[in-house]
Image: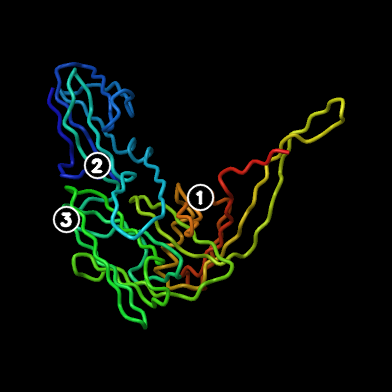
Amino acid sequence: MDSYISPNSEFPSFAGPVVYNITTSDSLLDVDLYESGNLSVPLASRRIRVVDGKALFDVGPILRRRMALQPVGGVTGLFADDGCMAEIHIYAGGEFSPWVRCVAMPHERRLRMVTSMPPRRTIRYGESDRILLFVPGRVTVEVEALSPAGDQAQSYEWDSGGGAVVLRLRTTDFDPETERFIVRINGEVAVTYEVDFPVREAVRLAWRTASGSVEHYTFPVVASRTLVPASTAVEDSQGRRTVAAEETTETVVLSRFEPAALTAAIAGAVSSPQVWTVDDERGIYNPVEVVDARTEYYGFGELRNIRLTLRPVKNTRLS
């Protein structure tokens, strides 16, 4: 049995098709897809009809469906992001194919920043951010913090043979008087953060894009309410009493009037399969669901702002 992947690429992207072309003399072929580190249970199994001695197995949809990220906070630096990468191979005709490293982002054979957010951003001291990079080989990232007391710069290097790498920026690793952060990738300015005034009531939201990046934006809080839509009651010798209740807190947030490019990027939270509220102090991302989304437009069709209603994935109170 011979097999190869098309399109031919050093890092195939499962943003589109990742097709195994398998040559065999069988009329039907059983194929198992495995991930590196787990050969006991396949990710998927297929029985494929062979046409003209060739079977085609597109693993792109399988990898897209299984992609799930769980970002964590922490110190500033470069870190591997395995959530948007997968090392896979197939087993067919009694043989394993070579391992292949696939990535979520559309493939280009060059160093690039994977983000839907504009290069000029706003951040508050105490907040954190993440920038996803596609690195074919080696990369050097410098974070420069500019403050009245003087400039502070930290440099980070990564060389792992290529793939997805995350730059984590934690503002509390730098001077509290910092007014601007400049991120340079291999010496070129990539992102500039202007440090804004803190907001007393605000929610920092993060969401996953289709390319595997996690974007952030701080929403002012509009309202918060607690709902108890259903409860479980029993009746015994002591009378009727509630033994459990589903308690849900909904938070309504509204974006500010931002530049069009930023507002369009924030709209990605509406359809994202994974959304979190960010606890920067503890470095925790808490999953939430967007239960309602409303967008406002100017008269000429330009997106104005976004209103989201958020609910924790699950919050059960026992009586």
- Nearer mark to the viewer, of 2 and 3: 3
Pointer 2 residue: 102
Residue type at mark 2?
Cys
Q: Please give left or right for residue 253 compared with residue 205 in the image.
A: right
79, above or below 265, in the image: above
**Which image quadrant: the N terminus?**
top left
Between circles 1 and 2, the one closer to the viewer is 1
Relative depth, front residue between 187 and 178: 178
Three-letter residue code for mark 1: Asn
Disc 3 residue crowd, few under 14, some 14–19, many 20+, Cα 10 Å: few
Residue lying at 67% horizontally and 41% vertically, measured from the top left? 317
The secondary element bearing badge 2 is classed as strand
Mark carried by residue 44: none
Within the image, what quadrant is residue 26 found in?
A: top left
- Amino acid of disc 3: Arg
Residue 149 locus on image (x, y percent) = 36, 82
Q: First in sequence, mark 2 or 3: give its number.
A: 2
The spot of residue 113 in percent (x, y) is 27, 60
Can you identify the residue that label 1 sits on? 286
Work out which residue is located at the far bottom of the displayed protein and give it: 148
Q: Can you identify the residue that label 3 sits on?
A: 138
Q: In which quarter of the image is the C terminus?
A: top right
Residue at screen point 45% across, 64% down = 127
Q: What element carries label 3?
A: strand
Chain-order first, disc 1 or disc 2: 2
Judged left or right of residue 248, residue 96 is left
Q: Distance between the residues labelled 1 and 2?
A: 27 Å
Residue 49: percent from left, percent from top = 25, 21
The reply to whether discs 2 and 3 touch (Cβ–Cβ < 8 Å) is no
Distance of mark 2 from mark 3, alpha carbons?
A: 18 Å
Q: Distance between the residues labelled 1 and 3?
A: 32 Å
Kindly indicate the quadrant of the structure image that contains residue 90. top left
